[in-house]
Amino acid sequence: MKTVTVIGIGLIGGSLALSLRQRGLAAHVIGVDHSPENLRTAQALGLIDEGTADLAAAVRRADLVVVAVPMDAMLTVLPQVLEEVEQQVVIDVGSTKSMLLAAVAGHPQRGRFVAVHPMAGTEYSGPEAAVPELFTGKTLVICDAEQSDADAVNQVQALFEQLQMNIEYLDAAAHDLHTAYVSHISHITSFALALTVLEKEKEEQQIFALASGGFASTVRLAKSSPDMWVPIFRQNRVNVLDVLDEHIKQLQHLRHLISQEDYPAVYQQIEQANLIKKILK
Ligand SMILES: NC(=O)c1ccc[n+]([C@@H]2O[C@H](COP(=O)([O-])OP(=O)(O)OC[C@H]3O[C@@H](n4cnc5c(N)ncnc54)[C@H](O)[C@@H]3O)[C@@H](O)[C@H]2O)c1
Ligand SMILES: O=C(O)C(=O)C[C@]1(C(=O)O)C=C[C@@H](O)C=C1
């Protein structure tokens, strides 16, 4: 890939730009962003070689186009990109897939687009949050690959393998279901935890004084941006509601057992939860 155009030069777009540049996989990176400030920061940090607001020209000049904007903007930006595409390869990096893939289904250039989701990120956003090794050793999900041209899928797989990512293939519906069950619910839990602690603990210095690893690790995701998460919850609403119902049931069950002073049952529930150690060491 000689020239890479990254639309949305924040955490993920910026980290991908950095990774590709550092490994010699992109000779020239063009940044496109609706925030002139983010473009300036991205250039100052060396994420991009040039920044522009001219999306059409930046797409036409690219060999690879990466669309890394929040999921609501993705629904309008990706079709605009496909309007300019001839032989270039286009990827998104979005966290939800079904609605996006429906939005571009039947587009004459659909084959040049490969839907991918790097299962890597942090709670921070914007170009200043970009880091080069974000993707190393993590999973990249490629969705509905049969809808993309085979040469485009092969190029994308080879590129991300060079970033040392593990490639998984899923259809969009399965992707949205499983990300709701693992990633999206974790964020809702963390947002609710932060809201709970802020509501109950009015002595802010006690949060600061008593917060140790446990609180820090469970509340980390609550620092994540609403610009990113509201569109994800909107686009994956049905799956999110399904897993959220189960989560509320689990919380209510634990509450019930503690209120009944049924500590042997609480013990059993914790032992059951500990089974997660077998999956995630
Ligand atoms: N943060 C994560 O952990 C993570 C992980 C995997 C995938 N994703 C997905 O990657 C995408 C980007 O997330 P991020 O964390 O990098 O967000 P971010 O906020 O760090 O960056 C998004 C960038 O897009 C720009 N932008 C927004 N709307 C735009 C538009 N209409 N046109 C041009 N630029 C626009 C913003 O100014 C910003 O620079 C999202 O779709 C998100 O769901 C995020
Ligand atoms: O580690 C984090 O901070 C993340 O939020 C990363 C995370 C995740 O849930 O694992 C968040 C959303 C993405 O779509 C993929 C990865």
Image (spheres, rainbow, N blue to C red):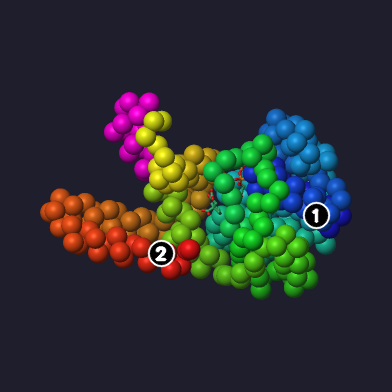
- Check disc 2 and report the residue beneath it: 276
Q: Main secondary structure of the magenta part?
A: helix
Depth check, front residue: 277 or 109: 277
Depth check, front residue: 106 or 183: 183
Residue depicted at 15% across the width and 50% down the height: 259
Q: Assign ligand 1 to one image quadrant.
A: top right
Determine the secondary structure under disc 1. loop
Depth check, front residue: 84 or 129: 129
Q: Is residue 250 above or below residue 146?
A: above
Residue 144 position in % (x across, y down): 62, 69
* Residue 59 seen: no
The tag on residue 23 is 1
Q: Say what amino acid the circle numbered 1 marks.
A: Arg
Residue depicted at 80% across the width and 54% down the height: 23
State yes or no: residue 105 in magenta: no
Residue 73 picture quarter: top right
The 10 Å Cα crowd at callout 2, few under 14, some 14 to 19, many 20 or more, is few
The 10 Å Cα crowd at callout 1, few under 14, some 14 to 19, many 20 or more, is few
State yes or no: residue 193 in magenta: yes
Residue depicted at 46% across the width and 59% down the height: 182
First in sequence: mark 2 vs mark 1: 1
Residue depicted at 50% across the width and 53% down the height: 235
Residue 172 position in % (x across, y down): 55, 66
Residue 167 position in % (x across, y down): 65, 68
Q: Is residue 45 left or right of residue 147?
A: right
**Disc 2/disc 1 C-alpha distance (Å):** 35 Å
Residue 47 picture quarter: top right
Q: Is residue 206 left or right of residue 40?
A: left
Q: Say what amino acid the circle numbered 2 marks.
A: Ile
Q: Is residue 174 left or right of residue 93?
A: left
Magenta residues span 191-207
Residue 91 position in % (x across, y down): 70, 58
